[in-house]
Amino acid sequence: MRLLLLLFIPFLFLFVLLVATGSLRAQPQVCNMDSVAMTPICQDACIICDIDGFSGRHESRVVGSLPSDFCTFTVHNAQWIAFQAGSTFLRIEITVSNCTIGNGLELALYESTDCTNFRMISNCRGGVTGPVRPGTSAIIETNLPLVIGQYYYLAMDGVRADNCDWSFRVLQGSTELAPLSLTAPIEGPDRFCPGTLQRFTTEPETGAVFFDWTLDGQSIGDHRTPFVDLELNEIGTYDLCVTAKNACDQALPTCKRIVVDTIPATEVIDVFCGEDCYELDGNTYCETGVYRYTIPLDNGCDSTVILNLTRLETPVNDLMLNICQGDTLWVGDTPLVATGQYTHTLQTALQCDSIVNVDLNVIVCNIQTTFRTTSTTCAGYTDGTLSFTVEDGTPPFTFTWQHLQTGQAGSGNIPDLHRSTTLTDLPPGDIVVELADGFGNADVLLARVMQPLPLVLAGQLSNYNGFNTSCFQSTDGRINVLAEGGSPPYSYRWSSGDTSAVVAELPAGIYQLTLSDALGCIIEQDFLLTAPQPLQADVQFFDPNCEGLTTGRVEVQMITGGVAPFLTALNEASFSEQLSYQGLPPGTYELLLEDANACTLRQRDTLVAPTIPVLSGETIYRTRLGCEIPLELAVNTIPLQHIQWRDPSYLSCADCLSPRARPLRSGDNLLTVTSYDGCADSLLIAFDVETLRAFYAPNAFSPNRDGINDEFYLVGSKEVASIDLTIFDRWGCIVFQARNMAPQDRAQAWDGTTKGQTAASGVYAWVAEIRFIDGDTQVHSG
């Protein structure tokens, strides 16, 4: 494949390449902003994408290179750095400080795309204009219009090899560009012919100055131009892409698929009449033949047209006719009554001209004839007739005849008068009959064979919202037929057996009609009656749940077939658009679904309610610690599968509905009952337990074995679980000790002895640790 690319640079020069070239210098690389370093030569300089506010260092011991017009007497240690223009004009303040020697810097702005050819675009500080001294600033202004997005160079040299800090501040204009977005669409032909030069362009976005063109992934063109010229010699499909960019950013690429192909020849087949010619693009063709014509198109391709033309020669009929004086010869719609030569043009069935040359001689004769014609039976038939009879004259007679449109002709003899002669199998049109006797007398007849209008059928079908029958398998289809043309009356014969113009009560299907007129002309036509798909629905019946007896539902979840919109009615209620019925009690329900054509579907089911337990009874009980209390609870009359208490530990029965309770502390307990349908009810029972912590200790006893107050022990209420009792004498010695004594347990009581001996009468102290049934413990003494 050979590529011919015309590359244009707007403000530099113009040149032509045969292939994409890489001779143009690459753009400067973006500086590493963590360590920006200037370079001694232009080719190595990096670019700062927004140099406004930047501070750098001119630091070099290498001479480097500068353009010849740089304002210095001697190049000592040249330094370069690049930036890009965000406006067409820049006014810059450059401040110099911290110089090694104290001489300052010389500087100027330059434009260059190859670091070989330079153009100064600003005032230059240095040489005769003086450098920028340390601690001072200089104003640098551009003196040529800048290209937004183009990169430019800041060139510096240290006076007598001085090295200094410098800062760059934009006073007017900008060195910042908005981010590039999407490369604009490629404009150019989608299809063109091989070997033609085509230009493709893209509209540059502000800030885009370089354009990377690729063809099937291969780089082409000059990256500085927003267009590329292509000349492709091979047929095929190519992907042309372009990416708009600048030195610091690039837009998303855009692509265009192009097709290189030839245009196939177009063949035109036509027939024209002999007196006409065929014209194409200013060329005239008047003879039968095959002609090739090439038409140049705007896209550079040639379109070839092959003309296959047939010229129909104009039929010429020469007639030499005699008519009697007072008669009229009709040629088409023209009457001829005088002797002379006449030329008339008639149209054939192909709409071409037919030339009739009539050499007419009007004579005085006494041949008298009558005639009549019958039209063709049906349009397009050739069964017309012409009958003529010689009523007066001298037989025998001869005759010749000719059909003026088709050229059919014939002749015959008539032996005597009043004998009818009939010409048969005639197509519609004009017929000339010339009769002659043996005496030079003649008669000419011009008759026209007619034909009826063609039979035409128009059918009107029943319409039920886009279908011809209302429901699937319904028989309400209807066809109303209107017939025209032919020879009424008409006879109808349907494939269904019907014989009228209107057929009704039809199911969906194809119906064939054979229509015949009074002359037996026939036309057949099929009529299709359509029906909707069967109306079906997914109707779900949901029994009431455990939340209540009125939680049943009937829902229409999906409808297929039929004709939208759809209506529903539940248990013969009014129709609505509702598809879900909520809050239904147990019972039998019938859902009626109706479509736009009144087709219906019935779904019937019974909703069965579950057995739902309902608890009742007293929910708050008050008692004393250690006392037992009966619970009075009940449930509605349904069988229960489960009875469960949350804490059965202090109940007389864990699965009884009304156990006896001996709670140890105030609180609540939850009773839950479940029916065999899985429905549950709960009742929260609250207990208010009063704690007295009551016990009794005697203050004296007489262990004399008389059966009265012979033991010392503590008497506790039902709240007391056990007692640890210790008795001390007046000197603090233990004389008695018992563990886990039961309240009122005389078997473990102190009988007044110690170490097997009767203790002396006197005052004794006791200490008791009392444990209660709710787990509480108290220490008492006396």
Image (cartoon, grey):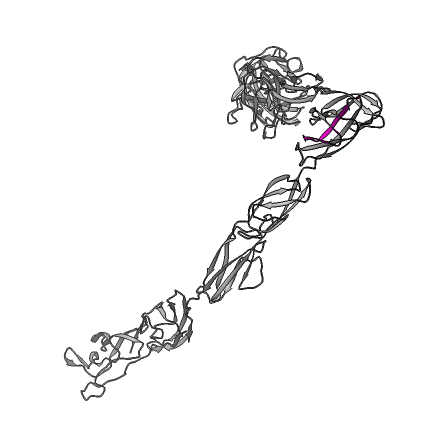
Magenta segment: does it hold 431? Answer: yes
Query: What is the x, y in percent for residue 126?
Result: 64, 15
Q: Position of residue 302 (x, y in %)?
A: 63, 17
Q: Is residue 510 above or below residue 646?
A: above
Residue 125 shows in this picture:
no
In this view of the protein, which residue sits in the foreground, 122 or 651? 651
Depth check: 397 or 534 in front?
397
* Segment colored magenta: 416-441
Quarter holding residue 156 = top right
Above or below: residue 230 compared with residue 777? above
Q: What secondary structure is the stretch in magenta mostly built from? A: strand
Q: Position of residue 563 (x, y in %)?
A: 57, 51
Q: Quarter of the image holding residue 637?
A: bottom left
Image quadrant for the C terminus? bottom left
Front in this rendered view, residue 1 or 43 = 1
Residue farthest to the left? 756
Asked if residue 345 is positioned above or below residue 673 in the image, the reply reads above
Reply above or below: 737 against 279: below
Image coordinates for residue 672, horizontal then vertical, percent: 38, 68
Q: Is residue 610 magenta?
A: no
